[in-house]
């Protein structure tokens, strides 16, 4: 009996340490909504005399082709998502991708009321959209402060995964300020909360029942939840919402630099005290950075008073910076600290392409050729040497690849093969040397070290 009593006491004590989400769900569930969209899709007709609207459309089209001058076939596609009400008069926040290309957006509340929503606006860079439904005294969520949320804290999501409305999942915060490729303007909150198709646009709550994020995406190899999900911090979402409500559009700050993380070898090659900051690989001509005097090889260590530990810290700060106003950036240049004021401009629709170059040498284990005018045009570079082959050796160890264009070696611009070989011959042994290459239209610093 005593053993049973001790086990029961242990279980009770253990259960007492686990979070209870019942009050959170009761208070906030009514403010979480289901969003369904309808989109008209136009598709070519199938082959002559062949059935349409079947899984065999592609098969028949492969053999018979499209019908000449045929009217395109239309069909309706529907998608599901989630959202939450932020004002008693019916403003609703969701993801921009939830309503992308939608002809009609319907919002359904937990009490079964359904409204056709008006799209106030959306911002694809942050993946936030603002909707409006009619109503008064609607249930609303409370907005929290994501800055106060600590890694390891319990959080919960409410949404409609796979259409199962008002479903609740929970987990912990796994990381903050997470940078994701092609999503550099959002420092995501990473969690292990189960997020699946249909959860997009729903709220992420802290244990005080406050919204701290908008569930936006998952990491998955299968299309389903695999343990990693990402939410847009609510302060960024609300800044977008406020701009959409007042102006109908969103302005994003633009600095005009390409940056990369600093590895330990790169830090040594630049004589930096540590491997922290954002290393500037390229500066766009006539950009805010160029006008402020920022150069290639500078290391941005703080921006707008916020420390830059890795390159991914910089884009969200730039994106949120006020357009047309000066912002202070702190740089490391040749071992010296330098403060510059940058007047941030609005992100252009299509930022200009950046020009760069490339190089090579036998001592490095690479073969380089002079760029032809046609290669310069195709690669959009103004000079440098093209890497045509890489053998095992220092260049390969540094990460140099065929197709790279070497722009600088040991911080010296590369002009022609003879000059490049002279630079290579004078490189010291056993010391990391910075190499600037152009790869795929972008600039990248690599750390090269010679052993002989």
Image (spheres, rainbow, N blue to C red):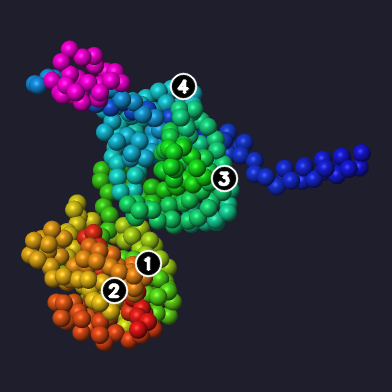
Label number found at residue 112 = 4
Q: Which residue is drawn at 45% across and 27% down?
A: 163
Tell me the mark number nearer the camera, choosing from 1 and 3: 1
The dominant secondary structure in magenta is loop
Q: Is residue 364 visible?
A: yes
Q: Do the residues labelled 2 and 4 touch (CB within 8 Å)?
A: no
Label number found at residue 119 = none
Q: Distance between the residues labelled 4 and 3?
A: 28 Å
Label number found at residue 365 = 2
Mark with earlier residue (4, 3): 4
Q: How far apart are marks 2 and 3 (CA)?
A: 50 Å
Seen in the picture, residue 132 relative to 52 is either above or below; the reply is below
Mark with earlier residue (1, 2): 1
Q: State which region is magenta.
A: 44-67
Element marked by disc 2: loop
Closer to us: 436 or 244 = 436
Which residue carries the number 1 mark? Answer: 261
Q: Is residue 343 visible?
A: no
Label number found at residue 171 = 3
Mark with earlier residue (2, 4): 4
When asked about the image quadrant of residue 372, the answer is: bottom left
Tell me the mark number nearer the camera, choosing from 1 and 2: 2
Mark with earlier residue (2, 3): 3
Tell me the mark number nearer the camera, choosing from 2 and 3: 2
């Amino acid at each position: 009996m005593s053993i049973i009593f001790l086990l029961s006491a242990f279980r009770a004590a253990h259960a007492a340490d686990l979070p209870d989400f019942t009050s959170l769900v009761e208070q906030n569930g009514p403010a979480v909504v289901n969003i369904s969209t309808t989109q008209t899709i136009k598709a070519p007709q199938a082959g002559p005399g062949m059935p349409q609207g079947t899984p065999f459309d592609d098969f028949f089209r492969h053999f018979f082709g499209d019908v000449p001058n045929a009217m395109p076939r239309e069909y309706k596609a529907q998608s599901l998502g989630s959202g939450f009400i932020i004002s008693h008069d019916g403003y609703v926040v969701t993801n921009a991708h939830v309503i992308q290309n939608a002809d009609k957006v319907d919002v359904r509340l937990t009490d079964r009321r359904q409204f056709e929503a008006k799209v106030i606006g959306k911002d694809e860079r942050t993946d936030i959209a603002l909707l409006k439904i009619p109503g008064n005294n609607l249930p609303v969520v409370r907005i929290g402060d994501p800055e106060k949320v600590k890694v390891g804290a319990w959080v919960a999501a409410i949404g409609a995964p796979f259409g199962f409305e008002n479903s609740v999942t929970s987990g912990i915060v796994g990381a903050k300020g997470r940078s994701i490729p092609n999503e550099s303007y959002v420092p995501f909150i990473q969690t292990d909360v189960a997020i699946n198709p249909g959860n997009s646009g729903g709220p992420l709550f802290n244990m005080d029942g406050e919204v701290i994020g908008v569930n936006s995406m998952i990491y998955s190899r299968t299309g389903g939840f695999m343990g990693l999900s990402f939410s847009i911090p609510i302060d960024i979402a609300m800044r977008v919402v406020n701009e959409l409500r007042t102006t109908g559009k969103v302005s994003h700050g633009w600095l005009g630099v390409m940056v990369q993380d600093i590895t330990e070898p790169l830090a040594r090659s630049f004589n930096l005290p540590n491997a922290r900051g954002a290393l500037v690989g390229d500066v766009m001509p006539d950009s805010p950075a160029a006008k402020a005097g920022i150069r290639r090889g500078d290391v941005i260590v703080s921006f707008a008073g916020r420390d830059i530990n890795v390159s991914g810290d910089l884009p969200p700060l730039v994106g949120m910076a006020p357009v047309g106003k000066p912002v202070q950036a702190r740089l490391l240049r040749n071992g010296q600290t330098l403060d510059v004021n940058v007047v941030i401009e609005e992100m252009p629709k299509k930022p200009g392409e950046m020009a760069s170059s490339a190089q090579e040498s036998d001592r490095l284990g690479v073969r380089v050729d002079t760029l032809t005018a046609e290669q310069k045009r195709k690669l959009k570079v103004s000079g440098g040497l093209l890497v045509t082959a890489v053998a095992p050796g220092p260049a390969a160890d540094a990460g140099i690849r065929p197709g790279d264009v070497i722009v600088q070696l040991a911080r010296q611009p590369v002009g022609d093969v003879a000059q490049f070989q002279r630079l290579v011959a004078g490189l010291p042994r056993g010391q990391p040397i910075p190499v600037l290459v152009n790869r795929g239209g972008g600039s990248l610093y690599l750390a090269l070290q010679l052993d002989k």
